[in-house]
Amino acid sequence: SQQGEEDPQALSIQEGENATMNCSYKTSINNLQWYRQNSGRGLVHLILIRSNEREKHSGRLRVTLDTSKKSSSLLITASRAADTASYFCATDAISGGSNYKLTFGKGTLLTVNP
Amino acid sequence: NAGVTQTPKFQVLKTGQSMTLQCAQDMNHEYMSWYRQDPGMGLRLIHYSVGAGITDQGEVPNGYNVSRSTTEDFPLRLLSAAPSQTSVYFCASSFAFGSLHFGNGTRLTVT
């Protein structure tokens, strides 16, 4: 079963507004990552936050992680039409050993209207 | 720097045929993985590898085989294609516990 679930499934905003997407997961993790996918293309990594971190920034992106609630949020500030894409969270569940297995949620489709 | 290269980009198979989806990376990444993406299902992990000679199953491994004889290559074999395997397939690689680099995908249709 999929570890992470994004919310909402779809989000439509106007250019210049902020967009917030949430991710909830089920089991303890080593890290959580956010990816963007433009239509018909491969996924592109945006940001990685480790389980001992609470917040990270990268340009117009801000990610928070609350391990007690098993949730994360991705905030895109001052959105642009070019931010229109699907956004996925991915988690690396703690499984022991050196295994590294990233599982993805179903994604949030963000539409930024000019 | 090519990154992750997947071939072919498109493929049409008849039910029962077999084929291999190729994936190669030139970043010396230990970790490689295969995902399939279906509408409304997000990405689901098929198989993954943490190094040459080591592979393991993901969430949806049935009907697929993998091998990892070199660090660079991680082919995915469909043994006997079924319409349920119609999907977009993505290969990805990374250093252990790092961010994934994705290929551009293979769009497979099984009729």
Image: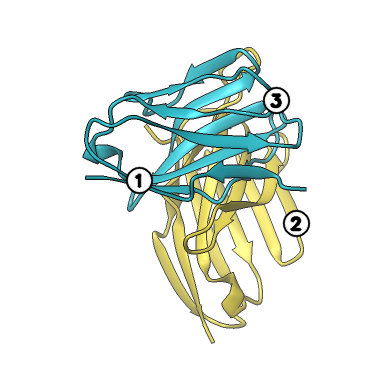
Chain colours: A yellow, B cyan
Cα separation between marks 2 and 1: 34 Å
Q: List the residue tagged with mark 2.
A: A57
Q: Going from the N terminus, do you reach mark 3 or mark 1 first?
A: 3
Residue B42 visible in rendering: no
Q: Which residue appears farthest toward the bottom when viewing the image?
A: A114
Position of residue B51 measured from the top left corner of the image (x, y, whole percent): 66, 19
Name the residue carrying label 3: B30
State the residue at coordinates (69%, 30%). Answer: B97
* Pair 3/2: label in front: 3
User: Of helix, strand and loop, which one carries label 3?
Assistant: loop
Mark 1 crowd level (few <14, some 14–19, many ≥20, 10 Å Cα): some
Q: Position of residue A18 (x, y in %)?
A: 59, 73
Front one among A20 and A91: A91
> Dot 3 falls on which chain?
B
Q: Chain of mark 2?
A: A
Q: Would residue A70 be found to the left or right of residue B19 on screen? A: right
User: Which dot marks residue B87?
Assistant: 1
Which residue type does callout 1 highlight? Ser
